[in-house]
Amino acid sequence: MTLPNVPPAEAEASADAVSIGEASRQSGLSVDTLRYYDREGLLGDLPRDAGGRRLFDVDMLGLLDVLVALRRTGMPIEQVREFSAHARSGVDATRAGRLALLREHRTRVHADLAQLNADLELIDWKIAAYQAAEDGQDPPPRKDNA
């Protein structure tokens, strides 16, 4: 994602900018969470309307989608902040840092998925064992023989 290298608060708000309420609706995040992200520095200097209300343009909504995915998959807020700052800078020199953060996070997500799949297999086996007991049958063998 390449964003202009002009702090949004100093640039004029684009015509397609939306309110925090609309950004909340589009992102699925609560208004309070969007305010938290803003306070934590994840969103940079958001432009504001004449009443001082935050405005979210198309680029910010796109970045927000990425930030939500990173948080939902367990990336620590400090790393999300670092990724966001690099992405908002629009500087090609930060691309390697963004790439490294994403690759490292992807490795962790794959490990988490593998563990979740193993846990799900155990839960499925336990359901089958209880169902077999309900039906007066022997439980099925576990795949890992544990």
Image (cartoon, rainbow, N blue to C red):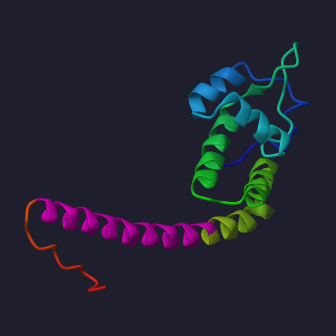
Report the side of 81 relative to 112 (left or right): right
Residue 87 locus on image (x, y percent): 74, 52
**Which residue sits at x=15%, y=65%?**
133
Task: Examine the image and state in which quarter residue 15 appears.
Answer: top right
- Residue at the far right: name it: 10
In the rendered view, would you say 61 is above or below 73? above
Residue 24 locus on image (x, y percent): 64, 28
Q: Observer-nearest residue: 43 or 32?
A: 32
Report the side of 138 relative to 126 (left or right): left
Q: How many marks?
A: 0
**Which residue sits at x=70%, y=28%?**
31
Report the side of 5 relative to 142 (left or right): right
Task: Examine the image and state in which quarter residue 91 appears.
Answer: bottom right
**Which residue sits at x=57%, y=71%?**
108
**Which residue sits at x=57%, y=29%?**
26
In the rendered view, would you say 105 is above or below 71? below
Q: Observer-nearest residue: 139 or 29?
A: 139
Q: Main secondary structure of the magenta part?
A: helix
- Is residue 121 a member of the stretch shown in magenta? yes
- Residue at the far bottom: name it: 145
Residue 7 locus on image (x, y percent): 88, 38
Q: Observer-nearest residue: 14 or 107?
A: 107
Q: What are the residue bounds of the magenta stretch?
A: 105-134
- Residue at the far top: name it: 51
Q: Quadrant of the C terminus?
A: bottom left
In the rendered view, would you say 77 is above or below 51? below
